[in-house]
């Protein structure tokens, strides 16, 4: 019988309104918190397992590793497994970087990958180069992280899940070139005006002498 385990903590306080630097993320929290950051999200660990097996009826996560029928404690019956995407990414800004876990909803929305894209017949089978390239593409994002405490082997650590994520378009080469070009200022007109004033004064002086 495969025991079921929770992969996400559901309850959380409202997110902070302002984004903070990654270096200022907490190292411990008393309760689950939602924290906004702005930075680059990218895949750096290519040797991780990119999915988990869930109940095909209720979508609850399982700790099963083999791709065969599992016992679901919530449905109280044996069910076919359903592969769902889950992987870790690096979230970084100029101050620091941390590891965060992405779950199916975000993976499908921003990365276009589902459990159907993954071969689950071999638990340690690598992803195709096409999928790896797709996941490894850096994304500049506004990210809401879910911070929670995780205890394993008697050691507690603050972990982060991606609660929500919205992509910010990366600047194009044209945008970067425009930013680097100096501003073109209009030519000064003071010299021309001074010449006009000088010419006018000289004409008046000559007219006065002639009279």
Image (spheres, rainbow, N blue to C red):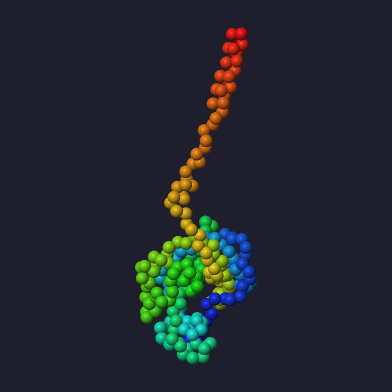
Q: Residue at x 58, y 70 (%)?
A: 147
- How many marks can you see? 0
Q: Residue at x 57, y 26 (%)?
A: 193
Up-down: is 139 above or below 64?
above
Up-down: is 7 above or below 138?
below
Residue 205, given in percent of the width and then of the height, sits at: 60, 13
Residue 190, given in percent of the width and then of the height, sits at: 56, 28
Choose between 58 and 30: the one closer to the eye.
58
Up-down: is 64 above or below 169?
below
Choose between 25 and 57: the one closer to the eye.
57
Up-down: is 150 above or below 185?
below
Taking the image as shown, residue 119 lies to the left or right of residue 11, namely: left
Q: Residue at x 41, y 83 (%)?
A: 66
Residue furthest bottom in the image: 77
Regarding residue 80, the answer to whether it shows in the image is yes
Taking the image as shown, residue 208 lies to the left or right of residue 55, namely: right
Residue furthest front in the image: 211
Residue 23, given in percent of the width and then of the height, sits at: 56, 60
The image quadrant where one finds the C terminus is top right
Choose between 46 and 11: the one closer to the eye.
11
Taking the image as shown, residue 145 lies to the left or right of residue 108, namely: right
Q: Residue at x 55, y 30 (%)?
A: 189
Regarding residue 63, the answer to whether it shows in the image is no
Q: Quadrant of residue 132?
A: bottom left
Choose between 189 and 171: the one closer to the eye.
189
């Amino acid at each position: 019988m495969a025991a079921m385990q929770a992969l996400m903590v559901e309850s959380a306080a409202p997110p902070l309104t302002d984004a903070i630097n990654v270096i200022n993320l907490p190292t411990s929290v008393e309760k689950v918190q939602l924290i906004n950051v702005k930075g680059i999200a990218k895949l750096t660990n290519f040797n991780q397992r990119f999915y988990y097996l869930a109940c095909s009826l209720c979508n609850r996560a399982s700790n099963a590793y083999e791709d065969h029928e599992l016992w679901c404690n919530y449905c109280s019956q044996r069910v076919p497994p359903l592969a769902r995407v889950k992987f870790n990414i690096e979230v970084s800004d100029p101050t620091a970087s941390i590891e965060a876990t992405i779950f199916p909803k975000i993976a499908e929305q921003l990365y276009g990958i589902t459990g159907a894209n993954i071969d689950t017949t071999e638990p340690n089978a690598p992803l195709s180069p096409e999928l790896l390239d797709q996941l490894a593409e850096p994304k500049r994002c506004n990210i809401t992280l879910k911070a929670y405490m995780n205890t394993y082997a008697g050691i507690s650590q603050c972990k982060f899940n991606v609660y929500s994520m919205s992509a910010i378009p990366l600047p194009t080469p044209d945008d970067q070139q425009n930013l680097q070009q100096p501003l073109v200022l209009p030519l000064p007109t003071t010299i021309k005006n001074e010449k006009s004033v000088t010419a006018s004064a000289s004409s008046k002086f000559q007219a006065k002498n002639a009279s």
